[in-house]
Amino acid sequence: MKLSKSSFRRTGTVVAGAAVGLIGVMTTAMPALACHPNIKPASACVNNDGTWVVEWTVQASDNAFGDGKVGKVEYSATTTKPSDADKAQTISFTGIAEGDKLSHFSKLHATQTVSKETETATLKITGEWKRNNGSNFIDAKNLSTNKPTEVCKGQPELPNPGESTQPNPAESTKPSNPGESTKPNPAESTKPSNPGESTQPVPGTSSSASQAAPSKPAEEVVTEPQLVYDNTCDNLTVGVVVPDDNKESVTVKFTPNKGDAKTVTAKPGETKTVDFDAAAGLVVTASAEGQEDTTIDYEAPADCDTGALAVTGSNSSTIAGGAVLVLLVGAGLFFMARRRKVRFTA
């Protein structure tokens, strides 16, 4: 088989055309391999004093030449108002410096703070890379951002210019009468967190102010040990609450009009309570060493059935014994019935 010259010519033409096309693709694609710094303003906000802050991020546009480094770092602050031209300036710039690694896979962060007269903040970064043949490739990019309207978080509130900060002389606190007692009114005692729990001041724990110094202002809360009590259908709970700032422990003896007395000792910051069986007419007397006694009367809650209180004492033992006896008799009759044989007759 013989090939004609025209066939060779056609084949050569196709090969030449493909080569020319490949060269064109390579020449047009090469610029896309050039790296450059890619700059973005991650965030911007205004401080209360009018200065504002820009958070910049910088990374390589691609990885054609691998990781590069930061060359020059240039930043500026400008304004269009001629009167503020000299006042528009960068107050501080931190986060990116010459020589930092410039990569496509990680970001560099910088913070630029500018004056309140600044309208536009600009950042320019020059990047440097090494080509495979050892030559340097350098490219620079810059980006500007305008003054934002968002207020920076965590800014303290500025005082109202029209609001006076001078104290009102008429509202100055006068010391109370040195001879006046600071003992709280029992009717004004603090109500505890437990809805059913009441409080009274510990007997005798209040003290009169010294003659040498005025007492505390009337509006200041005096933290003192407090008696607490709670009425339930089954118990009268009594106890003492000692504040954290109390200097000493408090011991209180609770003596009921029926039954044995109980004593509690609470340290600063502690609450100690004891229970007494609920009974009509129950009265418990609270006493501390060297102090006046305080009585606490039991009052059954409104939702209790006062005619059907729990039975205790010797009567309860008698009832329990009778119940056991009835149970034993029933069990004996049951077993006797099972032992009887039933016969059928024709």
Image: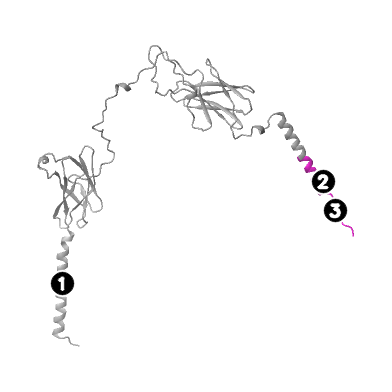
Direction from residue 155 to residue 122 in the image, left or right: left
Residue 29 at x, y percent in the picture? 17, 64
- Is residue 283 found left or right of 60 in the rendered image? right
Instruction: Please name whichever residue, 260 or 166, is drawn nearer the observer in this view of the structure.
Output: 166
Amino acid at circle 1:
Ala
Q: In the image shown, does 100 or 121 lie closer to the viewer?
A: 121
Q: Quadrant of residue 182 in the image?
A: top left
Task: Determine the secondary structure under disc 3.
Answer: loop
**Disc marking residue 336:** 2
Distance (Cα) linking label 3 and label 1: 119 Å
CA separation in Å, label 3 and label 2:
13 Å
Q: Dot 3 corresponds to which residue?
A: 342
Residue 19: give its label: 1
Q: Which of the 4 image quarters holds residue 46?
A: top left
Residue type pointed to by label 3: Val
Q: Residue at x 16, y 62 (%)?
A: 30
Among the two numbered marks 3 and 2 on one chain, the one whose residue lies closer to the N terminus: 2
Secondary structure of residue under mark 2: helix
